[in-house]
Image (cartoon, rainbow, N blue to C red):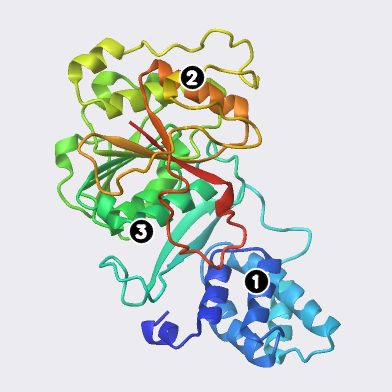
Amino acid sequence: MAEQELDSMSLSELRLLSAFLAMETTDSLLCLARECGGGKLTEKVQSFIWDHCLTKAVGKGYESYSKKFVKKLITEIESNHGNVLDELYEQYASYMISFKDDNPVKENERVCKCISFLFPDCFKLSICPKSRKLVVPLHCSLNMLEGDTGCSVWPSSLFLSELILSYPHIFSGKSCFEVGSGVGLVGICLAHVKASKVILSDGDLSTLANMKLNLEKNRLNTETNLPEPSIENQNVVKCIHLPWESASAKELQNFMPEIILGADVIYDPSCLPHLVKVLAILLNKKKSYIENREGSIPNSFPGDGKVNDTHDLDASSFHAQRINTSEVKGIINDAVDLVPRADPVAYIASVIRNAGTFDRFLALAAQADLRIEDLTSTLRPSHLLPYMKSYDRSSIRLFTVT
């Protein structure tokens, strides 16, 4: 879509278009459409939807998605005794011919949606495009379990992406390594803020293949499992197959990044010992330490009978109180520097769905001499996805691990 055309849109229209391209729910689209019309689905709003959403959206999955939206839109207008544009009736008739109700988009089908980061006028950073928007097309799955969870867009990856774009000085010029990179959105944002090196990893091969496709869609060159020195161009993103359980210190010490990132990686209790081991190796620059710690992170800890238990754990080694089901508290909440650090640091964004699982992570991290800080209230990213009503930022916690 031409930049001049986008620039002529009002903020409410831009949010509606962005929500449509991101395949937000039909209820969200109708809510945003009403905002465009001062509370009503006016003919002007309908014309905007026709001109900018229905006739110009291209990509796998949009036709089936648009059919559901147009059906709901027509129903809402008619129920309020409004006038429906002929174009909308004709478009819905076309959808009825092309798609049958008994043949919807399958849950495991891949679609191409676009995530649009909208920068407010007060945003003066150099990474902000002239159009004040960054549109990232992503090939992803509607099934959140496909590809070992890695082929869907998860809330914590949206949060980390907002963080990177809000504080580019933290990541610009730094060597960055993401564990469990999924669709590659975080890596794309790292490349946008000019991280010196971007290394993305995942343990699932289908996720890795989909990630590489998304990088290419966003005009980034990719390298797969090539030696570290080969990364010289900031437009080159390295993709590696890295199952945590089989990762070795020798393999990981070839990277030694300055910043490690992870989105929603604290979810499977059985994987946590391997995750902690990977983080411990990447965070410590001393080769002798790495060699001594290789294989020393235990698969369990005293009193751990069931991986999903929510029993009390001793978190005193974190200088903090225990996390419980009602409140995430006590992990070190001291003020932190918002500037790049000399030592490696990991930024982990996560929704804590099970207190016992997170307690297990805390205990394993303590055994690995890792320090965790809660930056949720200290390092808040700007709201760059104001149209995305399905994205609940309040449920996401941000931690650093050092």
Which quarter of the rendering shows the N terminus? bottom left
**Mark 1 to mark 3: distance in Å?**
25 Å
User: Circle 3 sits on which residue?
Assistant: 165
Q: Residue at x 24, y 13 (%)?
A: 291
Label annotation for residue 29: 1
Which quarter of the rendering shows the C terminus? top left
Q: Earlier in the sequence, mark 1 or mark 3?
A: 1
Tell me the SS state at disc 1. helix
User: Circle 2 sits on which residue?
Assistant: 363
Tell me the SS state at disc 3. helix
Along the line of sight, the residue nearer the viewer: 191 or 326 = 326
Q: Amino acid at mark 1?
A: Leu
> 162 left or right of 194?
right
The reply to whether residue 118 is visible in this rendering is yes
Q: Position of residue 369 (x, y in %)?
A: 35, 19
Tell me the SS state at disc 2. helix
Q: Quadrant of residue 136?
A: bottom left
Q: Earlier in the sequence, mark 2 or mark 3?
A: 3
Q: Nearer the viewer, mark 2 or mark 3?
A: 2
Position of residue 13 relative to residue 366, above or below, is below
Q: Earlier in the sequence, mark 2 or mark 1?
A: 1
Position of residue 173 relative to residue 95, above or below, is above
Q: Position of residue 263 (x, y in %)?
A: 46, 42
